[in-house]
Image (cartoon, helix red, strand yellow):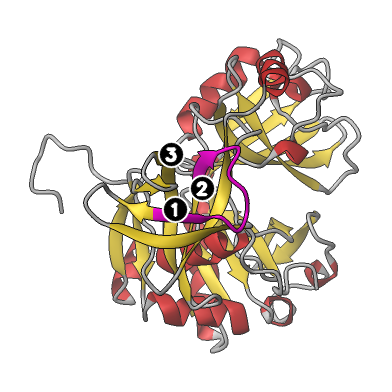
Amino acid sequence: MLNNPTMTPLKQTPLYRDHVELGAKMVDFGGWDLPVQYEGILAEYAATRQSVTVFDVSHMGEFIIEGDALTSGLDRIVTMPIVDMPLKTCRYGMILNETGGVIDDLIVFRVERDNWFIVVNAATAEKDAAHFQKHLTAAAKFTDVSAQTGKLDLQGPRSREILKKFVSGAEKLDYYSFGFFDLLRENVLISRTGYTGELGYEIFFPWDKTPDLWRALLQSGDVKPAGLGARDILRLEMGYSLYGHELSEAINPLEAGLTKFVHFDKSFIGKDALLALKSSGMTRRIVGIVSEDKRSPRAGQKLFSGEPEAGVVTSGSFSPHCQRGIGLGFVPAALSVGEKIFFGDAGRKFPAQIASRFFYKTGSIKS
């Protein structure tokens, strides 16, 4: 309970009591009271890489947009093309401001020809909703279903095996596709997507029924709960961006290494600004950072190339896969992979090397 009555209470997912009963350590994450760990971050990381875990990500935002991709204005709002998307497939991309900064990264699901389901980050959901409503045309219908939608991510090389015990047919889904399936007497959307680098599924469940699914998965005896701590290491080893760290309205997708999710052969908000940036040349870019030992870079620390300050760490952690501290950060575009760099502050600097940001490449994600 918050001691200061003037503070805004943290939001809770439908699983808050379940997390507390499991002894989870709870933290404030973007205004939500969420579990950072249960058994321990490294144990939950290992269970995801080697077996199967479930994450509560019910705090994420979900929108439904009805309307033709072009006449609704939806195709112009997102950076990736959606006109040619087959039904029951998903695509990752971004929504940008007029200067090319990233308002949010998101996934678009094509449910029917003129029906779209969109998943956005929790911290930006209200801002995202306002952006969509501002730029969609009168031909579109926008509905925010975040408050009615719970979300559990079943992740790990055994996730397909476990899912088959609860639902028929979902195990046949291809990567970045989805379908509607009967699960615990509910017809729900299940997608073969995730944020861990392992084979996995995201299950969108009625908000007030989500505890039933959570408990059923844990009672199977095969699935362990995992929290934000393990999730952050898993995504960091994959080089995945986290909004507010590697992405923001002050960061554009070109310097963030996400150019392949920006299609310049279509119209989108922020396109002219990105074309101008391409023409003038990028001054900085995102890179991976590998420490010389287990000491980890931390978000906000400075990066140094020799004496001059060269950039900033955006994320960092100890990597069980690399057995070293790793991180992501922005450095001058002229610096290249293999060059020595230091992280820390003016008083104390620690040696590291610039590396590819994709640290983990042997996952079960597409198996």
Label 3, label 2: how far apart the Cα atoms are: 11 Å
- First in sequence, mark 3 or 2: give its number: 3
Residue at the (51%, 70%) spot, across then down: 214
Q: Position of residue 280 (x, y in %)?
A: 67, 18
Q: Position of residue 307 (x, y in %)?
A: 36, 44
Q: Residue furthest front?
A: 306
Amino acid of disc 3:
Ala
Pointer 3 residue:
123
Mark seen at residue 242:
2
Q: Is residue 303 above or below residue 68?
A: below
Name the element at disc 1: strand
- First in sequence, mark 2 or 1: give its number: 2
Residue at the (51%, 84%) spot, across then down: 219
Residue at the (56%, 20%) spot, across then down: 131
Amino acid of disc 2:
Leu
- First in sequence, mark 1 or 3: give its number: 3
Looking at the image, residue 20 sits to the left or right of residue 257; the answer is left
Q: Position of residue 56 (x, y in %)?
A: 48, 62
Name the element at disc 3: loop
Amino acid of disc 1:
Ser
Q: Residue furthest bottom?
A: 221
Q: How busy is the neighbourhood of tag 2: few (under 14 within 10 Å), some, or many (20 plus)?
A: some
Label 2, label 1: how far apart the Cα atoms are: 8 Å
Label 1, label 3: how far apart the Cα atoms are: 17 Å
Circle 2 or circle 1, nearest the eye:
1
Say if residue 52 shows up in the picture. Answer: no
Q: Which residues are magenta?
A: 329-342
The quarter of the image holding the N terminus is bottom left
Q: Quadrant of residue 152?
A: bottom right
- Report the number of numbered marks: 3
The quarter of the image holding the C terminus is bottom right
